[in-house]
Image (cartoon, rainbow, N blue to C red):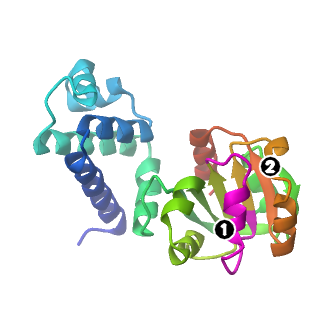
Amino acid sequence: MPDSREQGRTDLARRIAGEVVMSDDPGGTLRRWREDFSVSQTRLAEQLDVSPSVVSDYESGRRSSPGIGVVRRTVDALLAVDESRGGSHIRQYARVLSAGFESDVVYDLREYPTAVAVERLYDALDATELLAGGATAVAGHTVINSVEAIRRLSSDEFYRLYGQSTNRALVFSNVTRGESPLVALRVVTPTPSAVVLHGIEPGDVWEHAPDLARADGYSLAVSAMELDAMLERLERLA
């Protein structure tokens, strides 16, 4: 019987292959996953033992849509490259998929072995705290595409963003002022320990955001760190 890590890899491989095969633009879907895994065309081509132009031709649509055999080899090669680097992307996506979310809605969902001080979390993200909350430590984090989450998740699914514990940091990416995710949190009980609005500066934050955070008792911060760098920092933090 496969262990949980092997099962997570298998489930992820099936998910990627299924998306590619069912896509109206299979080459573009392959490219998106390759870029999500931070794998260059050259590195993927090396793993496949083909020239980079072959990968480029499939992704651009210059070659006919890849058959299932090509898709399977490409997905296996993509995952093999990630495994050679420690498998961080496989673990990240497997956690998200096992929680029942799509990877374009939730970028990462993680429980910590031991609680992490909120101050340490903010230091890792180069975050600026706008309002201190009641908790001094968090037991996990969830990184969320705020637009897709609000557009696609039901209230029950929104609650699942908390994973195994509500004592966590919810990091909302793809925000302009933070108004929508903070208003959405008003209808979710209980609230998180910390909220990070990602991709904006302190001066961009909605003027009522601190009042909402104060009313619900969570810490509020902002971070302008690039998304991939932030996910890497969070991986190391945990």
Q: Is residue 161 visible?
A: yes
- Residue 205, numbered label: 2
The stretch drawn in magenta includes residue 177:
yes
Q: Where is the N terminus found, in terms of image quarters?
A: bottom left
Task: Locate residue 184, reporting x and y percent.
Answer: 66, 68
Name the residue beneath numbered marker 1: 184
Q: Earlier in the sequence, mark 2 or mark 1?
A: 1
Q: Where is the C terminus found, in terms of image quarters?
A: bottom right
Residues packed near mark 2 inside 10 Å, few (<14), some (14 to 19) or many (20 plus): some
Residues packed near mark 1 inside 10 Å, few (<14), some (14 to 19) or many (20 plus): few
Magenta segment range? 174-194
Q: Residue at x 79, y 54 (%)?
A: 221
Secondary element at image label 1: helix
Question: Relative to 36, does residue 172 appear above or below in the rendering?
Answer: below
Q: Residue at x 74, y 49 (%)?
A: 177
Task: Locate residue 141, reporting x and y percent.
Answer: 63, 62
What's under tag 1, amino acid-wise? Ala
Q: Nearer the viewer, residue 209 or 102?
A: 209
What's under tag 2, amino acid-wise? Val
Prevailing SS of the magenta stretch: loop
Task: Locate residue 122, reporting x and y percent.
Answer: 77, 52
Residue 109 position by quadrant: bottom right
Residue 7 position by quadrant: bottom left
Q: Residue at x 80, y 68 (%)?
A: 218
Residue 165 position by quadrant: bottom right
The reply to whether callout 2 and callout 1 are in contact (CB within 8 Å) is no
